[in-house]
Image (tube, rainbow, N blue to C red):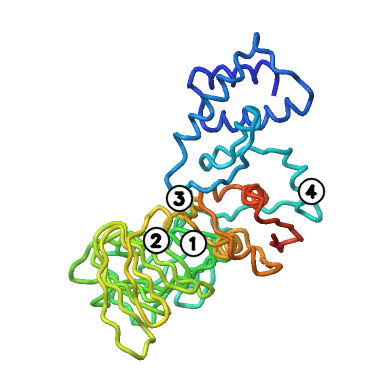
Amino acid sequence: MTKEQFQELIRKISDGEATDQEIGLYNRYYHLYQQAGESWDETEMGSQQVIGAKLQARIKQHLSPIAVIPLWRKTKTIAAAIAFVVLSSTLFFMLKKPTTYLNQISKNGADIAPGTNKAILTLSSGQKITVTDSLNGQLASENGITVSKTAEGLLVYKIAENVRKLSPEKYNTIETPKGGKYQIILPDGTKIWLNAASTLKYPASFSNYNERRVELSGEAYFEVTKNKAHPFIVKTERQEVEVLGTHFNVNSYKDEPDTKTTLLEGSVKVNALGIRTKIPAVVIKPGEQALASGNNIYVKTVDVTQAIDWKNDEFVFKNESLASIMRKVSRWYDVEVEFIGGKAAKETFSGSLSRQNTVSEVLKTLELTDRVHFEIDGRKIIVSN
């Protein structure tokens, strides 16, 4: 960046015209400018105190109520005060040059990119299709049902009007690996977003059933097409969720202690499975979460943005343990996580980060709290205090 471009960024910040991305650029280049030994010329750049005040105001504008514990260091100088870390997913300030920081935590200096759209589709015939590598357009056709991939990375099912009812064995499966996600539109128009390391099993057509039943392992967000005559049921290892038409999120990873169903719109009924003592089903309302834990189902009011953060390509934490955070990191970046000692895993954090950051950027933000330390060794992250 030239001196003139840097001055233009300063002008935009001073006039309140700068975008979040431009403020992120300013923060990065201000530090490099300072490292180069350049002094702040108020004749050319304006008042440094004014710029600091503008940026502090921007911090207050972006911080949500949950981001109350510090993900940045408290400092005395204006220059350091504007070096905030978590404003939003785009306002990320590199306190050190990225390569310098990366060399500190990575044994070989290599970073790890975030996940992308990738999945494997298994048809009822047993044919496997690697969706990621397939060209856009029609991928398969079976018994009058076509499966197509759009340019946006979406699987769409369509059924011919004259298609006959299919036998109950005609099930398809879509699976996302670690570091993958995908979206699918089922034959009834229901939209489903799959998070990393998730599997969804579903009929190739619902026309042969009184209910629309799918099976989930992992995490998915559902926007169910309304059909009172044919309830939509999501079965997981621990529960069944029954809906008519609604928007909700189900988190049912095997390495998570609880299964969580979070409702955004409509209403759903949650039934516990695999429990000897019969537990009455619970009905939840928008803004509530049904949590299947042990031999009980609990209902609580939650911030739904935290439940669907992954769908919006974010990590959102609210007093969340580092152990829980790193399970999400492990799935999205396809890495192994090792904790040294038990203390670090119990540390809690609040705030938000973009899932489009590299893993070193995520770790750097958490490390700035001075409560944890990370080291990257290949595809393993070692966590300690």
Decide: is 29 above or below 10: below
Q: Residue at x 25, y 62 (%)?
A: 285
Of mark 3 and mark 1, the one earlier in the sequence is 1
* Residue at the disc numbered 1: 195
Of mark 1 and mark 4, the one earlier in the sequence is 4
Rendered location of residue 372, percent (x, y): 67, 56
- Mark 1 or 4, which is nearer the eye? 4
Q: Judging from the image, what secondary structure is the residue with disc 1 in?
A: loop
**Looking at the rendered structure, which numbered label has been put on residue 221?**
2
Q: Label 3 sits on what residue type? A: Asn
Q: Label 4 sits on what residue type? A: Asn
- How many numbered marks have been drawn onto this rendered protein structure? 4
Decide: is 33 above or below 314: above
Q: Residue at x 48, y 21 (%)?
A: 16
Report the Cα–Cα distance between label 1 and label 4: 30 Å
* Residue at the disc numbered 4: 103
Of mark 4 and mark 3, the one earlier in the sequence is 4
Q: Label 1 sits on what residue type? A: Asn
* Residue at the disc numbered 3: 312
Q: Given contact means CB atoms under 8 Å apart, are the residues at marks 1 and 4 in contact? A: no
Report the Cα–Cα distance between label 1 and label 2: 8 Å
Question: Which is more toward the observer, 350 or 145?
Answer: 350
